[in-house]
Amino acid sequence: MSWNEILAHPLFSKTSTAKSTLKRAYRDAKAHGNDCYWTGWKDHPPGRARRISSDALDNVTTQFDEGVLRDGAHAQRCCFPDVSERTVRRNLSKVGYKGFVQPKKPLLKPEH
């Protein structure tokens, strides 16, 4: 529909949408190939790039399932030497592998 057809449409008069808002949405849709569902996001998400890609994380989870890797620290040493252990553990927890660092226990005395 053209801009004038939209303004003349009876449904537009029943809404409380401002003409400037509708005109901006119309202009954006026309600029993106008549895609009225265009959100404005770019092909890549905003912010810093991920240290561990989703493909690499899928590869690590497969290695966990096969028994090649033992824990997050072992995965970090084998697969991601340039990434910290904490980052690896955090990414593994996001995909469902809950883990923790085993605290050191004191040495037991014979009477204990």
Image (cartoon, rainbow, N blue to C red):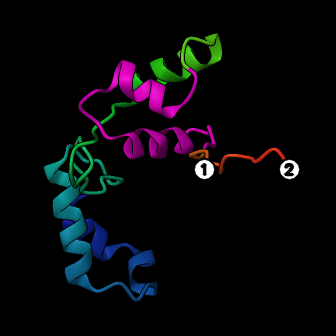
User: Which of 55/20 is in front?
Assistant: 55
Badge 1 amino acid: Pro
Residue visible at 44% across and 84% down in the picture: 15
Q: Main secondary structure of the magenta part?
A: helix
Residue visible at 56% across and 46% down in the picture: 101
Identify the residue under disc 1. 103
Q: Quadrant of residue 13?
A: bottom left
Q: Earlier in the sequence, mark 1 or mark 2?
A: 1
Q: Which mark is residue 111?
A: 2
Q: Regarding mark 2 in the picture, which secondary structure is present there?
A: loop
In the displayed structure, does residue 92 sit left or right of residue 3?
right
What's the magenta region?
70-99
Q: Quadrant of residue 66?
A: top right
Badge 2 amino acid: Glu
- In the figure, 79 relative to 90: above or below? above
Q: Regarding mark 1 in the picture, which secondary structure is present there?
A: loop
In the displayed structure, does residue 97 sit left or right of residue 27?
right
Q: Residue furthest right?
A: 111
